[in-house]
Image (cartoon, helix red, strand yellow):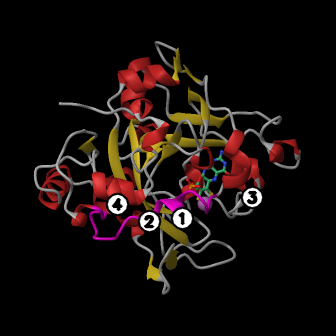
Amino acid sequence: MLIQKPSEISSSEITPEHVYLSRNHFIKAAGGIGAALAVASCQRWMGATKIEENQQPPSSKALFDELGDPLTPYSSITTYNNYYEFGSDKQSPAERAKTFRTSPWEIVVDGLVRNPKTFGLEDLLRIFVQEERIYRLRCVEGWSMVIPWIGFSLAELLREVQPLSHADYVRFETVYAPGQMQMQNIKTYPWPYQEGLRIDEAMHELTILATGLYGKNMPPQNGAPIRLVVPWKFGFKSIKSIVRIELVQEKPLTFWRSIDPEEYGFFANVNPDISHSRWSQQSERRIGEISRRRTLLFNGYGEQVAHLYAGMDLRLDY
Ligand SMILES: Nc1nc2c(c(=O)[nH]1)N[C@H]1C(S)=C(S)[C@@H](COP(=O)(O)O)O[C@H]1N2
Ligand SMILES: [Mo]
């Protein structure tokens, strides 16, 4: 089996979705949709397709998520971004992150672990098999996309460092580079951006560290070289350009929560029945579509994740 890592994808292979669609060296072949559905139904989550080369072109039907929703075009995913370090509007990140330096890059994984380690990005690409995951991304602002990420389970990385039994939470930190990220010079924000997960959420098989999308390296505006993706939570949990992952005992303070705890909860699970203090969360605008669609509890991943919250009052602890 030939596994193609994003590091081996040369820039001449830059693959916006038309190349990706026509060429498919990423979706396990053996019949396109059939294989994709088989994977989806036996693993109960979508897109656990190993990245392979020299395969047959896929059936175009494989280019949907497990609910049948089409992938959002590459051009939209890479030009409509939230990345406050580069600006608070949707267009600035693509423009201003162009020269952001993502190599060399290291991630420190430490805190309450038996085996703290610093990984270079190339170590992560070598140690962990990169696979494709097609996930919906739902922003707390009321828009959504379907994105074919490339990455690996956060659980695999955490197992390498061996969390201690009292490591109840995981804290993530974005790089602090005010020379390159102009908004980090604005001191009213609590830089660097931080996020957190409970340990069982971090260990869940759906939680990934993503290193690319649409079969190519992660664009800087999407959080290069490595970012978190937690598909059943609002997009702000999916922190970009990570340099530190720390195992901790207490619930970590997070960027948006420290700005406004009323509006942004720690769990931030997608939930149509819990309104943001300024707008309803019952519907969303899928980028590229005209009419709004109904927002799904846990962003449609309830079957996989609802058990994590059994017994919790989601209205109080959101
Ligand atoms: N460091 C950092 N990570 C971040 C953000 C940010 O501003 N800074 N924005 C978040 C929000 S609100 C969303 S919706 C997603 C957007 O990811 P995308 O631009 O790749 O679609 O990134 C999240 N991760
Ligand atoms: Mo967001």
Q: Are marks 1 and 2 in contact (CB under 8 Å)?
A: yes
Q: Amino acid at mark 3?
A: Asp
Q: Is residue 285 left or right of residue 101?
A: left
| Helix, strand or loop under label 2 | loop
| Helix, strand or loop under label 4 | loop
Residue to which mark 2 is pinned? 72
Per the rendering, the mark at residue 301 is: 4
Q: Are marks 1 and 3 in contact (CB under 8 Å)?
A: no
What is the x, y in percent for residue 143? 55, 71
Tell which circle, 1 or 3, labels the residue nearer the N-terminal end: 1
Image quarter of the N terminus = top left
Which of discs 4 and 1 lies nearer the camera? The answer is 1
Tell which circle, 4 or 3, labels the residue nearer the N-terminal end: 3
Q: Amino acid at mark 1?
A: Ser
Residue in the picture at 49% in, 57% down:
233
Residue to which mark 3 is pinned? 260
Which of discs 1 and 3 lies nearer the camera? The answer is 1
Residue in the picture at 38% in, 22% down:
126
Which of discs 2 and 3 lies nearer the camera? The answer is 2
| Helix, strand or loop under label 1 | helix
- Check residue 67 for magenta coloring: yes
- Check residue 190 for magenta coloring: no
Which of discs 4 and 3 lies nearer the camera? The answer is 4
Tell which circle, 4 or 2, labels the residue nearer the N-terminal end: 2
Q: Amino acid at mark 2?
A: Thr
Q: Which residues are magenta?
A: 63-81
Q: For the residues marked 2 and 3, what is the alpha-carbon distance in whole angstroms?
A: 30 Å
Residue to which mark 1 is pinned? 76
Q: Is residue 211 visible?
A: no
Q: Amino acid at mark 4?
A: Tyr
19 or 122, which lies in front?
19
Q: Specify the principal SS of the magenta part.
A: loop
